[in-house]
Image (cartoon, coloured by chain):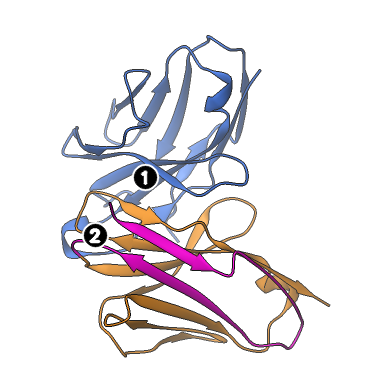
Chain colours: A blue, B orange
Amino acid sequence: EPEVTQTPSHQVTQMGQEVILRCVPISNHLYFYWYRQILGQKVEFLVSFYNNEISEKSEIFDDQFSVERPDGSNFTLKIRSTKLEDSAMYFCASSVDLTRGVEAFFGQGTRLTVV
Amino acid sequence: EDKVVQSPLSLVVHEGDTVTLNCSYEVTNFRSLLWYKQEKKAPTFLFMLTSSGIEKKSGRLSSILDKKELSSILNITATQTGDSAIYLCALDNYGQNFVFGPGTRLSVLP
């Protein structure tokens, strides 16, 4: 069964460092998302991406964050100059076509720990 | 601002019990409501509801939407320890994302 894959599963980084979280969405999906979940809190939307550009982003997704689809398969989230409060589980998701109202499939997440 | 509220936030039951989880929402433009189950990591898709009054069923799980009351319930009958998880309700509001509720943490004791 096709699935969204994320790497690494766990990343520890020092405050101020840059991290890149990687995702391979399901191959025929067109919409890609990043969500995050701080421990014990709810899943929060960061950004959605369609047709090689950001289609929507939340207030959390400030200049510290960027997304890219460097090739036909990978979808990355870059966090520049990480802060302690960036520690969270980051989920990538993809859907076939959000315009028709379909479910998103989530990857297993990357647990980011900033020390 | 669109909002999703879930109740209870936490629930402890014994195997064999039936549970009902609630989700209510405020939204400007409703397209669908989705239920996800989150165990250790990724939310996994359970149901998508678009029309009022039509029950969706999968094994011991079922869900129904009430657009008049702006709410949905997720029922789990004959619970098992494997049902222990956080159950997330999410709203598709025609935006480019989903709005998630805080989740209901269900613990099923043997």
Quadrant assignment for the N terminus of chain A? bottom left
Tell me the magenta residue range. Answer: B1-29
Q: Quadrant of residue B34?
A: bottom left
Which residue lies under the disc numbered 2?
Answer: B93
Q: Which mark is residue A85?
A: none
Is A13 located above or below residue A10 in the figure? above
Q: Residues within 10 Å of mark 2 (few under 14, many from 20)?
A: some
Q: Is B16 a magenta residue? A: yes
Quadrant assignment for the C terminus of chain A? top right
Residue B26 visible: yes
The amino acid sitting under disc 1 is Pro
Residue A26 visible: no
Q: Residue at x 39, y 48 (%)?
A: A93
Which residue lies under the disc numbered 1?
Answer: A25
Q: Residue at x 16, y 39 (%)?
A: A51
The amino acid sitting under disc 2 is Asn
Is B15 located above or below residue B96 in the figure? below
Residue A27 percent location from the top left of the image: 31, 48
- Magenta stretch, main secondary structure, is strand
